[in-house]
Amino acid sequence: MYIKELTNIDGVSGFEEKVREFIKEKIQDKVDHIKEDTIGNLIAFKKGQTDKRLMLSAHMDEVGFIVSNIEEDGKLSIIPLGSIDPRTVFGKKVLVGEKQIPGVIGSKPIHLMDSLEKVTSFENIKVDIGATKKQEVELKVKIGDSVSFAPNTMIHQGWISGKALDDRGGCSILMDLIDLNINPYYDTYFSFVVQEETGLRGSGPASFQINPDFAIVIETTTSGDNPEFPEDRRSTELGKGPAITPAHRGYVNDEKLFNFAVKIALENQIPYQIKRRTVGGTDAQRIAITTGTPALVISIPSRYIHSPMSVLNIKDYENTLKLLSILITKEVK
Amino acid sequence: MKELIKKLTSVSSPSGREEEIRNTILEELKGSIDGYEIDKLGNLIVWKKGKKEGKILLDAHMDEVGVLATYIDERGFIRIEAIGGVSPYNLLGSSISFPKVEGIVGIEGETPEELTKNIRNLDFDKIYVDIGAKSREEAEKLVPPGTFGVYHYSFKDLGERIVSKSLDDRIGCTIIIEVLKRANPYYDLFGTFSTQEEIGLVGASVVAFNIKPDLAIAIDVTSNSDTPKGSKRMSLELGKGPTIKIKDRASISDRKVVETLKKFADKNNIPYQVEILLYGGTDAAMLQRTGEGIIAGTLSIPTRYVHSPNEMVDMNDVENAIKLLKALVESEEPLS
């Protein structure tokens, strides 16, 4: 499991180099072929027993920010990359740009609010790197630099918490599948794609190059299993196994793949759950509309994704890996 | 033709679950086509050979809006999510057909005030489906989570006008089937019955890629403006002819398609209307941007109560759309 190392790397959408390098270094000697494409996707190949092609895809990028302006007082204005709830970011540590300049996300203090003000927009949120003048900041930070949440991963008694579990969890699963040295049924393409969070941008070119017959997207998805939230309103629940998606924004997942994944889970007594919400899209949609490839999403449920700290259950991770490790040895039917 | 429409609308095939409608259409076309193919996304592509080199594509989506069962509580009540543009208001007092059972839609409300509030601000979190089951186990046998459903089928023949669920877009499927049956195309004629339009124009994104047609026309329903306090900013009336789309939210029809359709309508004394739809989109949006780009547009049938269990069209518009498309595909005019 590479989650700890993967989540501690910064790689917001459009700035995935370090994640790609890490993955490449770990897997390149264990696959038949590996390549980086023009947009920045990393595609590794393992020969199967038939010529039909299976694409397994996870995205390398994480939600974060980009510096949009340096203010006169030395604070940084930022724009989110991907959807982030602004309420979750105050007082969080971030790293800015290539030099990894530490900063703190700040806004109006609670003491100066008349009452607890409504959700603040990113217009009122700045990054403070401990400077007083624009000129001083300009020596270390440029407009266009990435801003990522600082590494904070903890693994404790069966749980993992940290930033970027979405979708380094999926990346780690793909890497583990490679490590298991499974002889896959199909010619299998392990694709680590860029810029999912800003609009499913990397997976289209990846799918175009692979032209797969089937695709499975491995995601880390919303749970919503908060105590105040009734069971039927939740999307998934931690500890109940990998979530198999019947349909989400823009795409009804392939029926045959859906039934196939459920069947394998049942046959092998792997706990699984059906994702209950259809909000949010994934690369499965992009892959389907790019190459006409039937696609399915299988996810590790996770709490608080798209915030500086998310949580997942290691059992779910293991069961997701187990499900996929069996699935890729079988013919889809 | 009403019999064909009845047959097609009676099929339950929401987005992503088009197998049954695909088989029904294929069965209906037996003997009227020269070949067919089903692609990986489930699109049905049929063709009829012409006399001259060139390709015209007519597209209609075969899926319909529906719902997805996501969760069953311990008493057997089912929670659902929308597949495509289903308003929860259209489900009130209505029922849903799942493959094995029919379900009634109810609203939550612990007090009369809460019930009133929920009715005023209805969303999918406040409704449930009751299939008469008394436990989770009983309900799970009939509607396991992941099951798709559609509006209950009830076809009404009102004479010139008909009412049914899924006229969007089984009416387009009907039109293409009739054109394939009646016309002797001059150029190769392709009919594509595409999947998953309602959730995001999925099938049409790839359906024309290998065909590379010279001209593509999506046949779909559109809205109307001829009801009490109907839309002021549009002019779309039932019975005044099929509508030649200029634009909607997703595409601007190629000028050539618009002018060609107008010309054939005028030449054959077929009534038509010009359509500017303030919202919505059709498969033409995806056909247009396929591969190197395709000359594409939309011919629509004015429809009332779109995406409800009771969509209404005028048969004269349907007949005139068929006449217009027949004239177009039989014409010997050059395609470019």
Image: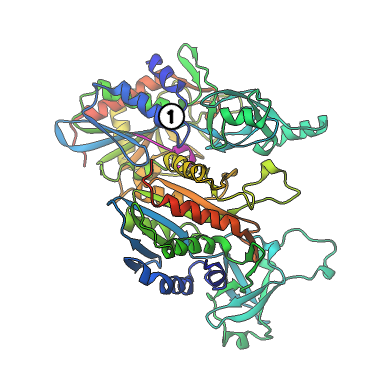
Secondary structure category for the residue under label 1: helix
**Three-letter amino acid code at the position of disc 1:** Asp
Q: Quadrant of residue B75?
A: top right
Q: Is residue B181 visible?
A: yes
User: Can residue B178 be seen from the camera position used here?
Assistant: no
How far across and down, in percent of the image, does residue A294 sit?
39, 45
Q: In percent of the image, x 85 and y 63: which residue is there?
A: A114
- Residue placed most toward the observer, B74 or A329: A329
| Residue B159, position as x, y percentages in the image | 47, 11
The image quadrant that residue A87 belongs to is: bottom right
Q: Which residue is mark 1?
A: B169
Query: Which quadrant of the rendered structure holds the C terminus of chain A?
Result: top left
Coordinates of residue A113 in the picture (x, y in percent): 82, 66
Which residue sits furthest top? B159
Residue A263: say if magenta.
no
* Pointer 1 chain: B
Residue B196 painted magenta = yes
On the rendered structure, is A185 left or right of A286?
A: left
Please provide the residue range marked out in magenta: B193-201
Q: Give the residue displayed 82% in from the left and 31% down from the top.
A: B111
| Residue B50 in the image: above or below residue B155 | below
